[in-house]
Image (spheres, rainbow, N blue to C red):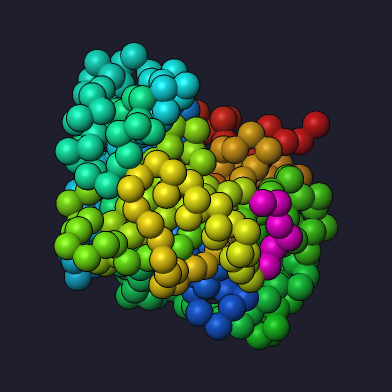
């Protein structure tokens, strides 16, 4: 039997982030069901950092994570975690309202987004089809996130702080007695005062292992694909281009173009795989909005984006079970909010208040607390 003060179940970016912070407060074990951390969602993300979100909680967690992403601790990463990219929201004429509805008046006034003409948009992304475009807005400060660098940074920093990672450790049962949890895993028993449920698509299954009803997490499958640009066309300077109603996006990726149909298919927790129909939808939507012709897919994959019923994360202590903390439902914004979410979950694990900078960014603990799903 292994013992620690804190047991974090799941070693994706959420689990690694909270483990990194919990190491300041005691001994930590991370139990990961796969042979490598981040296999399912964290390792399949095409993440962008942006403060464009209208929802105060998402915008607040993103803003509170910004300083860390822009200037991580020395030795955390070997390269910058953020690379300037920009985000171009595009729409047909009938989508003009949807383009502007992406932003609050304050965001537009503060320069988070700026309105572009069709000519401006085509200057930025020359492959766009002028006849398709009716409206466009640019988020100039949006940046690519080095997903692997961020996740590996949390894992390495956690390890240096003494966190123990156990892989191939599926949690089958959690029992609580005498102020301690005992986890039965495929790698033996682990005891801890506090359990943090950062199991992604499997978060409700972990709750069930503890004898708790799940909170309704829903994994949604999303497809991505890459293809080569036409000869002589360099996509590297382009911003990410995203449909105003999130029916597709495309962006430069290591000399190629990465695209997605922004599909959301309900799924069981699983090793998600792309389906041909979704790849075809992605190609069709990109081709209709641009002058590109996709002759060959160089790579395709799928991942699970996990949402709570209200599409906000769940972070905090479960009132039904002492020392059981939730950190799940990060949806499509997990990478850009992970640092602040990890701190928020760590605060809950040590019965502290929401960190002041997160609260001052507009996040209320009650907005993301598990209680909102309990009646």
At 27% from the left edge and 47% from the top edge, which residue is drawn? 127
Quadrant in which residue 279 is drawn: bottom right
The spot of residue 140 in percent (x, y) is 21, 36
In depth, the one of 287 and 40 nearer the eye is 287
As for residue 269 lying within the magenta part, the answer is yes
The residue located at (19%, 31%) in the rendering is: 120
Q: Report whether 87 appears left or right of 184.
A: left
- Tell me the quarter of the picture where residue 319 sits: top right
Whole-percent x, y for residue 105 in the image: 34, 14
Q: Main secondary structure of the magenta part?
A: loop
- Would you place residue 319 above or below residue 366 in this image? below
100 drawn magenta? no
In the picture, which quadrant includes the C terminus?
Answer: top right
Q: Position of residue 235 (x, y in %)?
A: 22, 56
264 is higher (above) or lower (below) than 36: above
Q: Is residue 270 left or right of residue 135?
A: right
Residue that appears at 52% across and 72% down: 39
The answer to whether residue 331 shows anywhere in this view is yes
| Region of the chain picked out in magenta, as a range | 265-270
Residue 50 lies, in percent from the top left, at 33, 40
Q: In this view, does 73 lie to the left or right of 365?
A: left
Depth check: give the residue in front, 367 or 304: 304
């Amino acid at each position: 039997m292994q013992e620690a003060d804190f047991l974090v179940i799941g070693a994706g970016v959420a689990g690694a982030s909270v483990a990194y912070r919990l190491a300041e407060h005691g001994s930590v074990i991370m139990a990961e069901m796969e042979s490598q951390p981040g296999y399912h969602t964290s390792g399949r993300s095409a993440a962008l950092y942006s403060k464009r979100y209208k929802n105060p909680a998402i915008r607040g967690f993103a803003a509170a994570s910004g300083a860390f992403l822009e200037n991580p601790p020395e030795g955390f990463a070997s390269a910058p975690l953020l690379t300037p990219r920009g985000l171009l929201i595009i729409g047909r004429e009938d989508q003009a309202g949807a383009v502007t509805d992406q932003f609050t008046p304050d965001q537009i006034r503060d320069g988070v987004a700026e309105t572009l003409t069709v000519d401006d948009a085509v200057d930025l992304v020359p492959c766009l089809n002028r006849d398709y475009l009716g409206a466009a807005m640019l988020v100039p400060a949006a940046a690519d996130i080095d997903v692997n660098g961020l996740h590996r940074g949390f894992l390495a920093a956690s390890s240096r702080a003494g966190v123990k990672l156990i892989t191939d450790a599926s949690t089958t049962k959690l029992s609580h007695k005498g102020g301690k949890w005992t986890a039965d895993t495929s790698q033996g028993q682990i005891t801890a005062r506090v359990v943090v449920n950062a199991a992604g698509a499997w978060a409700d299954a972990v709750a069930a292992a503890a004898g708790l009803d799940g909170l309704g997490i829903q994994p949604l499958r999303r497809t991505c694909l890459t293809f080569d640009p036409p000869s002589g066309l360099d996509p590297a300077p382009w911003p990410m281009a995203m449909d105003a109603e999130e029916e597709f996006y495309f962006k430069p990726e290591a000399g190629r173009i990465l695209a997605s149909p922004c599909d959301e298919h309900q799924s069981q927790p699983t090793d998600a795989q792309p389906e041909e129909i979704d790849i075809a939808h992605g190609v069709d939507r990109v081709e209709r909005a641009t002058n590109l012709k996709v002759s060959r897919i160089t790579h395709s994959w799928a991942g699970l984006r996990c949402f709570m019923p209200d599409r906000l994360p769940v972070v905090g202590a479960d009132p039904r079970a002492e020392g059981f903390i939730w950190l799940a439902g990060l949806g499509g914004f997990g990478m850009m909010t992970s640092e602040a979410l990890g701190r928020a979950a760590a605060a809950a694990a040590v019965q502290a208040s929401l960190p002041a900078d997160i609260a001052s960014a507009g996040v209320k603990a009650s907005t993301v607390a598990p209680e909102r799903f309990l009646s």
